[in-house]
Image: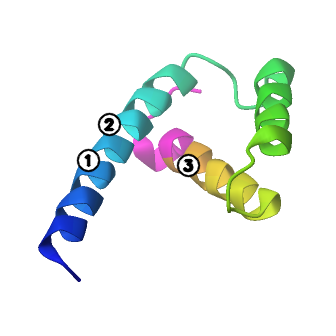
Amino acid sequence: MKAALRHQLAQLDRSLLALLNERARLLREVPLDDPGRRAALEDLMRRHGGPFDAAALNRVFENIDQGCCSPSSGSQT
């Protein structure tokens, strides 16, 4: 892999991690079973328009939510 591509990927990974940490911080303020949060995520899956399969993308969000809000993560929700 070219050095420039590795650098771009590393930058994206750092950005993704920062966004995931921010999402986790906000998510701890909202119950996991909040219907509005679920509806917003379902709407996002319908509109995403990217190369990811909607079901696979939904699993990604579920894993993110479970990872940041599991008992071992120290979440209070």
Residue in view at x 47 percent, y 32 percent: 24
Q: Give the Cα distance between marks 2 and 3.
A: 13 Å
Image quarter where the N terminus lies is: bottom left
In the image, which is nearer the foreground, mark 2 or mark 3?
A: 2
Q: Position of residue 68 (x, y in %)?
A: 49, 42
Q: Which residue is mark 3?
A: 64
Q: Secondary structure at mark 3?
A: helix
Report the front residue among 67 and 11: 11
Rendering colour mode = rainbow
Residue type at mark 1 is: Arg
Disc 1 vs disc 2: Cβ atoms closer than 8 Å?
yes
In the image, which is nearer the foreground, mark 3 or mark 1?
A: 1
Residue type at mark 2 is: Ala
Q: Relative to residue 42, is residue 1 depicted above or below? A: below
Image quarter where the C terminus lies is: top right
- Asked if residue 75 lies in the magenta stretch, the reply is yes
Q: Residues within 10 Å of mark 2 (few under 14, many from 20)?
A: few
Q: Residue 29 lies in what quarter of the image?
A: top right
Q: Secondary structure at mark 1?
A: helix
Q: Which residues are magenta?
A: 68-77
Which numbered tag is attached to residue 18?
2
Which numbered tag is attached to residue 14?
1
Residue type at mark 3 is: Ile
